[in-house]
Amino acid sequence: MSDPITIGIIGGSGLYDMGELTDREERTIATPFGEPSGPYVIGTLRGRRVAFLARHGAGHRLLPGELNYRANIFGMKLLGAEFILSASAVGSLQERYVPQHLVVPDQFFDRTRGRISTFFGHGLVAHVAFAHPVCGRLGSIAHEACKAVGATVHKGGTYVCMEGPQFSTLAESKLYRSWGMDVIGMTNLQEAKLAREAEICYATIALVTDYDCWHPDHDSVTVDMIVQNLVANANTARQVIAEAVSQLPFERTCECARALEHAIITRPEHVPAQIKRDLAPIIGRYVK
């Protein structure tokens, strides 16, 4: 029997594969929430069994607002993931975050509209604690991995998750800066919320591709320059993720591991049977 899969990797813009993966197989996962972005690529990375998912699908065909976040995270849970390392392209909202720098944020700010970001509802109510949306220990491992491969990395900071697919207006960009926000992207917040509900440790490596439109040199940025930064960032991200994976797993004493312990409000006898069946991988140890 092969080793269990405890580590999930979600690749964003530019990171559509993990070159070091060996013993590969593709696995299509059915979930109660529909189809994930694509098949999960199961393989061995630095001696660990991992599951890789390209967030935007093969050929980058899914908008941030089109992603089935619930299916993506639920699929990881079904595979056995206890840790998810995410990589995503972001814009910089502060001078110190230079293109091709990496940021390991520890906070999120939600500017999305109407995205489904919970597994609950339809007869089952739960409210997880989310003051600290990133697993502290996993975030530290990601940060140390960035340093180990020689990347310029910043630990901590706030990731603004905007709706998109358009980029910010100048007024919005200036406002986020005035609030002290650090980087801006379109995908990670829903993943973090759902991972917490699924009791999976989550951390993201934010890959700076360009300055947001607040910057006076923004108008001189070309698509070619951004693509070059995406390619460079993706190569760095592969190295960082491989290094981080080599430090996993760890004993999970963090709040992520038992996020639902005191979060489920609905009495078990009032939870619809179908919901109990559908969510058994997540709620099974709390609701029978």
Image: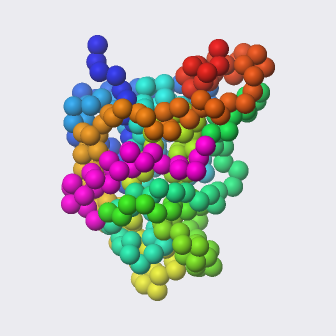
Q: Is residue 50 above or below residue 13?
A: above
Identify the image quadrant of the C terminus. top right
| Residue positioned 43% across, 54% down in the render | 88
Is residue 34 at least partly visible in the picture? no
Q: Closer to the camera, 211 or 19?
A: 211
Q: Position of residue 5 (x, y in %)?
A: 36, 26
Q: Closer to the camera, 13 or 239?
A: 239
Is residue 177 at least partly visible in the picture? yes
Magenta span includes 49: no
Q: Position of residue 42 (x, y in %)?
A: 34, 29
In this view, the residue farthest toward the bottom is 216
Location of residue 71 by image quarter: top right
Left or right: residue 148 compared with residue 248: left
Q: Which residues are magenta?
A: 129-152
- Count up the numbered dots: 0
Q: Is residue 234 above or below residue 50?
A: below
Q: Position of residue 213 (x, y in %)?
A: 51, 77
Please say which color scheme the image uses: rainbow
Q: Is residue 108 above or below residue 19?
A: below
Q: Position of residue 90 (x, y in %)?
A: 45, 63
Location of residue 53 by image quarter: top left
Q: Closer to the camera, 182 or 41?
A: 182
Left or right: residue 201 compared with residue 266: left
